[in-house]
Image: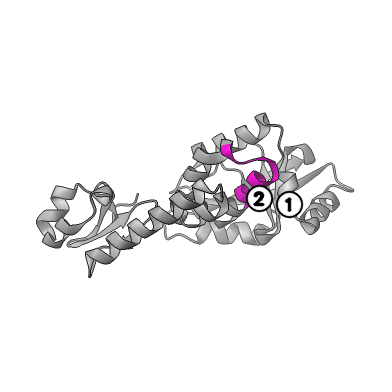
Amino acid sequence: MNKHCNKVSYSEALKVNAILHKLNQDLRDYIYKIDEDLYMIKHPFVTTLLVGDIDVVNKLYVRKMAIVGNALNKRDYEKAVSFIEKPFRADYLNLMKTSISGLNLLKLIKCVWIDSEYINMKTWEEIFVYIQESGLSLYEAMNKNEKKTLEDLFKDNEKIIVYRGYSSTHNNKKGYSFTLEQKLAQWFSTRFETDKEPEIFEIEIKKSDVMAYFSHEKEILVRI
């Protein structure tokens, strides 16, 4: 969490904004201060500024909670995850992974991974370890073109070079995600404002190091 968005207690926020007394009790432990008198909710079902009608926030929370609960009862895990706010999807996927079978799990993992903006290494490590221990492979979640690209990469090469762009500010040199394109890695290293120099991490990998190739960012998932 950056210095401009800090978690605060409900009682502290209530002193500044009395209308928060209407806020659903389930949401009161998820309040963040982003300015002098401006707050927001960061909850798995609701991420929004606390401005205007608080009843709208409460109704959205109750509605999404019901949708997710109903989807889980029907074992529609893809729908359930889609109604979770993006920053929390990997955590929910991690919780429900043992309930989802084979290829369905792999496809959902691919979907959530591609859609993730900030990677929680601990959560994803648990997911990837579970896949390995279950005898599953993300290779099966790749589409036909992705599989062909991966095969072609190593057709005449025992090793290839991949790149990871990062900023030392975020201390995220270590990670699963690399790209085939150095320019794309450069973009990732500069996409967040920082007073630190962007850096490119370059490594050589063998095919056995690869968990998957996803075409959306020419992304290689590397076993670490």
Would you say 202 lies left or right of 56 here? right
Residue 224 seen from this side? no
Q: Which residues are magenta?
A: 99-110
**Is the residue under label 1 in contact with that under label 2 (CB below 8 Å)?**
no
Magenta stretch prevailing secondary structure: helix
Is 101 within the magenta? yes
Percent x, y of residue 102: 69, 41
Q: CA distance from mark 2 to mark 1?
A: 8 Å
Left-right relation of 4 to 200: left
Q: Is 207 contained in the magenta span?
A: no
What secondary structure is found at the residue carrying circle 2? helix
Residue tagged by mark 1? 142
Q: Earlier in the sequence, mark 2 or mark 1?
A: 2
| Residue hosting label 2 | 107
Question: Can you give x and y, in whole percent of width and height, for residue 217 in the image?
Answer: 65, 59
Nearer the observer, disc 2 or disc 1? Answer: 2
